[in-house]
Image (tube, helix red, strand yellow):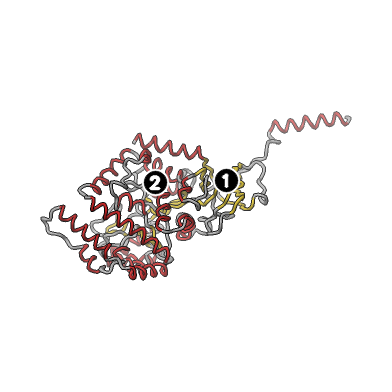
Amino acid sequence: MNRRQFAALLSLVFAAFCVLGACKKPRTSVLAIAHVTVIDMTGAPPAPDQTVLVDKAKIIALGSSDSIAIPSGAKTIDAHGKFLIPGLNDMHVHVTGAGEPNGSRKFILPLLVANGITTVRDMGGSVELLKGPREEIAGEKLLGPQIFFTGPYLDGNPPAYQPSITVKTADEARNAVDLLASERVDFIKTQSRLDRDAYFAIAEESKKKGIRFVGHVPDRVSALEASQSGQASIEHLTGILLSCSSEEKRLREEQFASGPLDEAPERALARSRAWQQRLLDSYSPKKAASLFRVFAANNTWQVPTFPILVHFGFMTPRTDLSQDRLMQFVPQNERALWAQGIRERLENRSEADFALREEIVKRSLAIAGEMRKAGVRFMAGTDTAAPNVLPGFSLHEDLALLVQAGLRPMEALQSATRNPAEFLGHLDSQGTIAAGKTADLVLLDANPLDEIHNAEKIRAVVVRGKLLDRAALDQFLDDAEKFANAN
């Protein structure tokens, strides 16, 4: 065989290997986000022209684009002009708030992911109903955010919401904590109607069980006492304005005083309005500063959940979202339930009532700003899916309201990224962008440090290494809207 014949034979052999697949382009599971500006959420300035490599669920490399070699066959995103932040956290949701089995899977979870939310803390729900989606998400059978949960509320008699475990005595409170600890909940959730003995028993038993308790400051407990008892996070700023009042003792007594049995509704409303006005008028900056120093020293985190305060708790006709275009994503049966609660919040109220509510919201924002100056830690949260609180979308409003309260855009974004990871004890694996961490990422079209609303300009989301581009996210929204119109 001469040289020409040998070369021809080699060509035939090579072609045969190609037909059999031996010379196909090398395959890789790596995702490369190239030439992106990384905002890693450590507090460091944005790093331009970076390349991030993701393999499966982990970030395997991060560095300047001229120093990172992209493996052959990697799926590459040219991210010139884009900004990369960690996946967002909503630290106050109710995943099963729209019912089961389809409510959370077809309505809440897709909207969370479409808005860049990759981790949530469920703050009240059935353990059995929550275990299903959490395990399916962890097992990659269902796409959704990582879920931490409290299970049912611990509340007094009668409880304010369901599902609740009613505890009337210290012994019942301790038994309830033991039960929930055996069910491996991540936190214990306290509610507003707890008696003092039950609340302090929860604090003591939670400490013994090595599980933190979070939630409302009960009406019969001061925010100062809650912090000193070890409550890890306070939701909705409950009890804080009252604890900042120079008339705290008298106002608390009046809060539980009943009017005459034959009291007209108009008179009851007038009494409530007068109480709230005195609450505002008696605000003591000195007392507030002392309380906020205690919060900072005790590491008592705050989750203000401004969307629920603005759009439901202290709503006015001007902040009612019933006709908002985003209601297209809310199932019709859920919208009907919301409408009932909204009517109750607005009916028989005067402009004076609404002006007072606006003043309470304004004061709440100012209080958050003062706490921030005192070194109190914050986490973003919404109370999804309460009336007028839209899954996913409302978290971005909460970030904007935190900025309005006085947080810098970096601090607001950290309240939804780094801070929750620290609070959850997972800062080693999530919350910031670094090699070795979980690949939960959000790719943005504009810089959120320049304008916090730019965090809404989402180009892609990476959920534990799985890329969802804009088309996939739009499909999530389309499917959620179709489900909403059919239910």
Residue 353 horizontal/vertical position (percent): 24, 53
Looking at the picture, tell me which residue is in the foreground, 292 or 135.
292
Amino acid type, residue under disc 1 in the picture: Gly
Write down the residue under mark 2.
Answer: 391
Q: Earlier in the sequence, mark 2 or mark 1?
A: 1
Q: Is residue 226 visible?
A: yes
Q: From this viewpoint, which residue is outermost toward the right?
A: 2
Q: Is residue 189 visible?
A: no
Looking at the picture, tell me which residue is in the foreground, 234 or 429.
234
Q: Mark number for residue 81?
A: 1
5 is higher (above) or lower (below) than 484:
above
Identified at 42% across, 52% down, the residue is: 400
Tag 2 secondary structure: loop
Identified at 62% across, 50% down, the residue is: 49
Q: Are marks 2 and 1 in contact (CB under 8 Å)?
A: no
485 is higher (above) or lower (below) than 360:
above
Residue 234 horizontal/vertical position (percent): 36, 61
Amino acid type, residue under disc 2 in the picture: Pro
Tag 1 secondary structure: loop
